[in-house]
Image: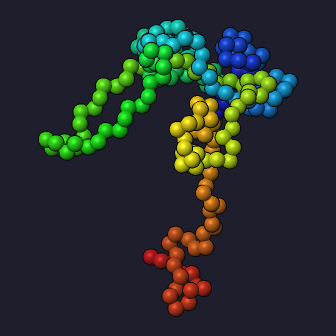
Amino acid sequence: MTAILYPVAADAAQAFAAPKGRAARERDAATLAGEAVAFLTEPLGPVYATREAALVALAGRIEDDRAGRITTLAAEDRFIQLTEMAAPRGGKRTRAPAPVAPTFEDGHRWPAPAPPPPTVWRAMISYWRIGGAPLRHAGDAQARQARRKGGEDMDRDTLRALTRQPLMAVKPQQPLDIGLFETRLPEAPHIVVPDE
């Protein structure tokens, strides 16, 4: 399987237009850049009203599955993706709709769904940023702990860092002392026998 070769650049615009090179792994990207690098995925270019407009504007740079215009890129060139997102209203980001309470009327549990919010399309580019991007780290806190401590006042970058950190167990998993289909004898608990 061929790995994606991500651009090595100082910012998203340079990664799209003229990167220093391309690398699949961090150590290769750091060698190309001559310094530390960080892997980022950032928005690129303008917002498009429809998917078709985005596909026309980025023709040859992303995969196109429309009839008559099918474009398939090599596996190593798939570092740009189209993303559908809620359209901003009045320059502000839209919030998710509030949860709907069940109605239990006329044999239906839920009311008719609200119309979906208007959406726009945006290109997202993944690349190796030169200089080690100033990434925000959530520290040792997990999302569930931050939410309990008043997660409403978190800024966007902290929330993004929380969602991108790996999941951690609440406590270390204990090793299994017996198998799934084994049991201990009641008269001799130190003996494990197969259970059928």
Q: Which residue is at 51% across, 13% downward?
A: 47
Q: Quadrant of the C terminus?
A: bottom left
Compared with 46, 148 (above or below) is below
Q: Which residue is at 81% across, 29% downward?
A: 36
- Residue 55: image x %, image y %? 49, 12
In front: 151, or 177? 151
Q: Quadrant of the N terminus?
A: top right
Compared with 144, 163 (above or below) is above
In front: 1, or 83? 83
- Residue 29: image x %, image y %? 78, 27
In front: 195, or 33? 33
- Relative horizontal placement of residue 30, taking residue 74 as reference (left or right): right
- Relative horizontal placement of residue 98, taking residue 75 as reference (left or right): left
- Residue 170: image x %, image y %? 60, 57
Q: Which residue is at 66% across, 30% downward?
A: 3
- Residue 32: image x %, image y %? 82, 23
Q: Is residue 70 visible in this depiction of the protein?
A: no
Q: Which residue is at 67% across, 13% downward?
A: 13
In the displayed orientation, state which residue is furthest to the left.
106
Colour scheme of the rendered structure: rainbow
Q: Is residue 117 visible in this depiction of the protein?
A: yes
Give the image quarter of residue 61.
top right
